[in-house]
Image (spheres, coloured by chain):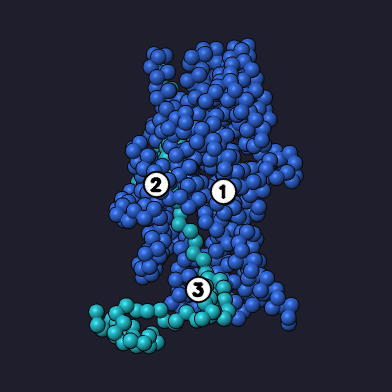
Amino acid sequence: IQAAWNLKTRALTEMVYVDEIDMDQEGIAEMILDENAIAQVARPGTSLKLPGTSQGGGPSPAVRPVTQSGRPITGFVRPSTQGGRPSTMEQAIRTPRTALTARPITSASGGYVRPGTASMLTNPDGPFINLSRLNLTKYAQKPKLAKALFEYIFHHENDIKNALDLAALATEYAQFKDWWWKVQIGKCYYRLGLYREAEKQFKSALKQQDMVDTILYLAKVYVRLDQPVTALNLFKQGLERFPGEVTLLCGIARIYEEMNNISSAAEYYKEVLKQDNTHVEAIACIGSNHFYSDQPEIALRFYRRLLQMGVYNCQLFNNLGLCCFYAQQYDMTLSSFERALFLAENEEETADVWYNLGHVAVGIGDLNLAYQCFKLTLVNNNNYAEAYNNLAVLEMRKGHTEQARALLQTASSLAPHMYEPHFNVAILSEKVGDLQRSYTAAQKSEEAFPGHVDTQQLIKQLKEHFAML
Amino acid sequence: MPEGTGALREVLPKQGTGGDPRPALPARPAPRSRPFSPFAGQLSVEDTAAMVLCKPKILPLKSVSLEKLEKLQRAALDAAQPPEAAPPPSAGPAPPRQ
């Protein structure tokens, strides 16, 4: 009977198991009310909250699209890919947090939609294990059952408190000699937001038994505490003990990417590929770096490799289409995009593909097609700021100034972090003679992208003009 | 092509012999020959800033964990919504099966 129970518990857990190493959805409450920050203002290059202050070494926003936090778009997205720390509450609410819906999650519990509902899914007439009636002490003393039960409670029921109780009892029973329970306690503390305690547990587990997983969990804690340099050091020490370990190398690369240090990230992703040349994340990231560094043919090679490995989804075909077009392999372009459209699972993906098709149309000079593509983008996703901006540019070409202005207004309010709509408003206003508006817009553009030469020239021109008055 | 050269002859200044088959240089090099410069004759350069397009978007690939999460979330949402006719799943005490 016990064996069957054990098996069923583990099967149920496996259904909803998502590796905790990856799982990391941060709620708004935690972002805004973060008490774990050590320094009020971090030195440049030591904080994940201030992107762009460390040496970039990558393509500028003039070439590479930028997300809400000011970081360039990465080639790979995981549950823990940060959207960045928003500076205001309003921005926080606007930032899409969940993978599926665009609505933000308010706190840690909100993100875990699978709890409880998971057990509802598997067992419509009630939970398999009724936690309130469980005698945890009894189970804590049977290590094998306890471990299966713990995983069940943690992943399937998502009841962290009970899981923590069980883990604490079990650790005591094992006289604090079992590293596995220490790691589990650490995980519970992490979920509950008690990061320093989690750190202690993981460190103690590491001392007892050196495991790559524990290193990864500990690094996660440091990342959450906004200590990327500590995490990096930890990884590098780990590499000394586990040379060539792909997960550690990947972890280092991810942190560098979060700190906006694209060149180091690329270096480490290459190391990953040397060890494991089927690593999807590394291939995708290097591919996108090459694309935005004006080397679409090389990017194409990387994405083709992914195709070889059997990755078959909308995003890959979209990227293939883009690379083919910019690498001048026009035969493959449209069929790739067709496939991408066919594989799109929701409207947002469809919108992305139409947006890129619009770019292709602009490239071949068919502005009517481009217009239609951007309109289709908006049909699928009404909040697509880039499409509004590009439509505005097209309208200006046709001479419809007022429409262009309205579209740019929408674009800039939807995406204040992008410099293009602001810059375009500045140009437009200057053309019609509205210099005040042009100046304010140019200021905003400079804020978003200080390195843009055209913006600086425009501001200089306007300043000279104002000085003359 | 006779028409071609005829049209050219109209545009270009007269060269001398009318039967010149190939289009000659529009201006004889002057006695003091100047090196040809593409900017010669240009009076002013105006660099008007043009509007910028937003860049093409490389879509990030999703990790396995992320896809699984999305699937779970979707399943959870579906489970929560359709059973409006059926009684909502009760989490009442059920006999723990051993």
Do tags 1 and 2 sit on the same chain? yes
* Residue A418 circle label: none
- The residue that disc 3 covers is B36
Select label 1 or label 3 by which is in front: 3
Query: What percent of the width, then of the height, locates residue A226?
Result: 66, 39
Q: Residue at 43% across / 37% down in the picture?
A: A280
Q: Is residue A64 visible?
A: yes
Measured as percent of width and height from the top left, residue A377 is found at: 40, 61
Q: Chain of mark 2?
A: A
> How many angstroms separate mark 1 from mark 2 (CA)?
19 Å
Residue at 59% in and 47% down: A57
Q: Chain of mark 3?
A: B
Looking at the rendered structure, the kind of residue marked 3 is: Phe
Residue with the mark numbered 1:
A58
* Image-based side of A330 in relation to A255, left or right: left
Q: In the rendered view, does B21 fall on the left or right side of A45?
A: left
Amino acid type, mark 1: Gly
Task: Indicate whether A150 appears above or below A387.
Answer: above
In the rendered image, residue A139, in percent from the top left (x then y), is placed at: 52, 16
Q: Nearer the viewer, residue A327 or A80?
A: A327
Q: Quadrant of the N terminus of chain A?
A: top left
Residue A179, located in which quarter of the rendered image?
top right
* Chain identity for the colour blue used in the image: A
* Crowd around label 1: few <14 · some 14–19 · many ≥20 (10 Å): some
Furthest-front residue in this view = B31
Whether labels 1 and 3 belong to a single chain: the reply is: no
Residue at the disc numbered 2: A300
Q: Colour of chain B?
A: cyan
